Amino acid sequence: MNSTLIICLVISVLTMISYVWGKIPMGLTSLLSMAAFILTGCLKPATALTYVGNANGIMIIAMFVVAAGFTRTQFVKKCAASVNKIARGSLMMVMLGYVLVTSLLAQFIQSSVIVFGIMAPMMIATCEELKISPSKTLFPLSIVSIATISALPLGSGATQAAELNGYLEANAYTEFVVGLTDPMKARLPMLIAVMIYCIFFATKFAPDKPIVETTEMKTRQDNKTALPPFQEKAGYIIFIATTLALIFQRQLRVETWVICLTGALAMVLFGVLSEKEAVASINWPMAFLLVGSFAMGGALTETGAGEVVGNALAKMANTISNPYLIGLVFFIVPFLLTQVMMNRTVMIIFIPIAILACKSMGANPIGIMILVQSACLSSFMTPMATPAVPMCMASGGYTIASLIKQSILPACILCIVSVAWIMTVFPLFP
């Protein structure tokens, strides 16, 4: 292990400690961490600069504005009142409705940030109708937005098999082929388990009120007056148009961040939000946190941390005879790494390693590949895991400590269900 990698790991650990400690603002910790990676040579300055204007960063900032514009309308309040009327004041029924709609939307939009950004304003308005804090429901909503993405062969999920077969071809292990419905067969029990947990149990572990107050909450509290008729209609037309454009993004051949940015600008252009309100709706500390998260993931990637862990994992797999234990290791390690590295990066590293490990054992790699993919797509324990988590933290007023506390049980459920089911349905040695 080289000295640069050791330094990178030390900075990463210290950053995580500072996040959990909570004495230094998370945005400041994030930027200090990025500076440390650059100064110690763990991250190239040019690479770090790309994270400031990253497409994901622009997308999440734009979604803050789009969501604020939609929340500003009476339409969202009317929707919330209708939901509450159907649910008859039952929080469980409210969660049932939102979980079902969110999981369905997640099959057509391959971005948990977008899915959460669309659903969160309505959930917040519903909570206000129920006279409960949104902090009870927003983290469960984010879990569904993250963990159910592309679980069914609809929309982006239809491309999962082709992507996995591409990995098999690239690693010259074409004796096995991933079928179109194989990813669905593997992930369906996990999807059901996540939905059941978030409907019936997750709200019981969520805080009764925000632990920290964010600028987004202050903006929501300030915007109580009704908009003029034109701006009112413009608000929900822009929101609906933005949502539809995101669903049909592939057909439109427009980048996701461009759609979000256009929606945000339209909210200001048509007077739904003033320029001041639009700027105030952006949670800048969370935006800085996101930039620092990209930097940490980039530093860990550049120094080869993922490859080191992956190669050690492959060696371990060759010494373990129990296929369920092999599956457990290939789920836990990528799942934990994805909390501090971008999920796409972890998949690029670990899926080939899983294939090569199976190839050396003469084993069926399909189950292990999907297991790694599931682990990488189910990261929600830290704000570094996926951009949807900082957005959720801003909306719900969560600290990292409260995130981890709420995450432990669903993470364990995901792990147990995924490993037990996938390694049974797709055994290593048929």
Image: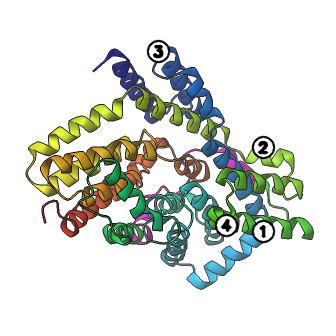
Q: Which one is closest to the eye, mark 3 or mark 1?
A: 3
Residue for badge 1: 236
| Residue 204 among those drawn in magenta | yes
Q: Which residue is mark 4?
A: 125
Q: Is residue 124 visible?
A: no
The residues colored magenta run 198-221
Mark 3–mark 1 CB contact (< 8 Å): no
Query: From what the image shows, is residue 191 above or below residue 14?
Result: below
Q: Disc 4 on helix, strand or loop?
A: helix
Residue 421: x %, y % from top left = 24, 67
Where disc 2 sits, the SS reads helix
* Dot label at residue 383: none
Residue at position x 39%, y 68% from top?
Answer: 191
> For the residues marked 4 and 3, what is the alpha-carbon distance in whole angstroms?
46 Å
Instruction: Please tell me whether mark 1 sits on a helix, a strand or a loop.
Output: helix
* 4 relative to 210 in the view: left or right: left
Give the residue type that dot 3 points to. Thr
Distance between the alpha carbons at the discs numbered 1 and 4: 14 Å
Q: Please tell me which of labels 3 and 2 falls first in the chain.
A: 3
Instruction: Identify residue for label 3.
Output: 40
Q: Earlier in the sequence, mark 1 or mark 4?
A: 4
Which callout, 3 or 2, points to the residue nearer the camera?
3
Q: Which residue is mark 2?
A: 279
